[in-house]
Amino acid sequence: MKTLIIYQSIHHDNTEKIAKVMANVLEAKLVKPQELDISTVAEYDLIGFGSGIYWGKHHKSLLNMVDKLPSQKNKKAFIFSTSGVGKKVS
């Protein structure tokens, strides 16, 4: 299964760390929204979308990119998020 993971990681690179682990397991290509050639999305069977959560939403660059994607049929997709909310463990 040909897999693409599109992610945005801003502050502490936590989302990027998670995306890299998933990409390694799935043998996926990793790209950021601003690096994506939208015309290539149809080449993939499984597409993942991920970012940190900012004011209750995924990063605006990821959401804006998703809005530009053409409609796809017979594709599988997943979404993931990270959050820095919580106590810091020493």
Image (cartoon, helix red, strand yellow):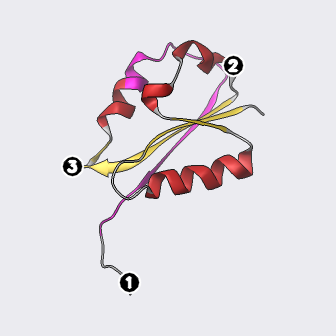
Seen in the picture, residue 19 relative to 4 is either above or below; the reply is below
* Residue of label 3: 55
Q: CA distance from mark 3 to mark 1?
A: 23 Å
Boundaries of the magenta span: 65-85
* Residue located at (36% from left, 60% from top): 83
Q: Which quadrant of the rendered structure holds the N terminus?
A: top right
**Lower position in the chain sequence, tag 2 or tag 1:** 2
Q: Amino acid at mark 2?
A: Glu
**Could you tell me residue 5's position as x and y percent?**
58, 38
Query: Which amino acid, by three-letter code, is at mark 1?
Result: Val
Residue sitting farthest toward the bottom: 90
Where is 57 relative to 72, above or below? below
Location of residue 66 in the rendering, given as x and y in whole percent from the top left corner: 42, 25
Which quadrant would residue 29 be assigned to in this image?
Answer: top right
**In this orientation, which residue lies closer to the viewer: 47 or 38?**
38
Residue annotated with mark 2: 43
**Secondary structure under badge 2?**
helix
Question: Camera-side residue: 35 or 44?
Answer: 35
Single out the mark in the foreground, 3 or 1: 1
Residue 75 locus on image (x, y percent): 65, 26
Which numbered dot is residue 89? 1
- Separation of residues labelled 2 and 1 (CA atoms): 42 Å
Q: Residues within 10 Å of mark 3 (few under 14, many from 20)?
A: few
Element at badge 3?
loop
Q: Secondary structure at mark 1?
A: loop
Q: Name the quadrant containing residue 65.
A: top left
Q: Is-magenta flag for residue 26? A: no
